[in-house]
Amino acid sequence: DTVVSRITPESIERGVREIIRHAEVDAIFVSCTSVRLLDACADLEARLGIPLTSSNHAMGWHALRLAGIEDDLSEFGSLYGMALAQT
């Protein structure tokens, strides 16, 4: 965990650029619960042109929505500007 938590947004960007250089994708899931994505997500999405999320990033969004907090928090990435789907 101490190694993964020190992965920089620049390193994440390099990895995503390598992935999208080889394949057309709709979004990127950055895997590992220790990756710090929240503060860098919106900036990375803007530079890369693709939505990003991780497990903790998505869990935080989901917890907010389940708690009834529907604020547009897209400064934390495009996911945080979305509403919880009603079924």
Image (cartoon, helix red, strand yellow):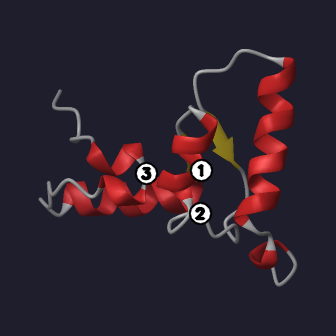
Three-letter amino acid code at the position of disc 3: Gly
Q: Is residue 82 left or right of residue 5?
A: left
Q: Quadrant of residue 9?
A: bottom right
Three-letter amino acid code at the position of disc 1: Leu
Marks 3/1 in contact by CB < 8 Å: the verdict is: no
Disc 3 or disc 1, which is closer to the eye? Answer: 1
Residue beneath the point at 51% across and 69% down: 39
Q: Which residue is mark 2?
A: 37
Three-letter amino acid code at the position of disc 2: Leu
Distance of label 3 from label 2 (alpha carbons): 9 Å
Q: Which mark is residue 70?
A: none
Q: Which mark is residue 77?
A: 3
Residue beneath the point at 54% across and 43% down: 45
Q: Quadrant of the N terminus?
A: bottom right
Q: Is tag 1's residue or tag 2's residue first in the polypeptide sequence? A: 2
**Mark 2: few/some/many CA within 10 Å (<14, 14-19, 20+):** many
Q: Is tag 3's residue or tag 2's residue first in the polypeptide sequence? A: 2
Distance of label 3 from label 1 (alpha carbons): 9 Å
Q: Residue 47 at what x, y percent from top left?
A: 60, 43
Q: Secondary structure at mark 1?
A: helix
Q: Is residue 28 left or right of residue 79?
A: right
Residue beneath the point at 82% across and 59% down: 11
Q: Residue 5 at what x, y percent from top left?
A: 75, 77
Q: Which mark is residue 44?
A: 1
Marks 1/2 in contact by CB < 8 Å: the verdict is: yes
Nearest the viewer among 72 and 34 is 72
Q: Residue 36 at what x, y percent from top left?
A: 63, 70
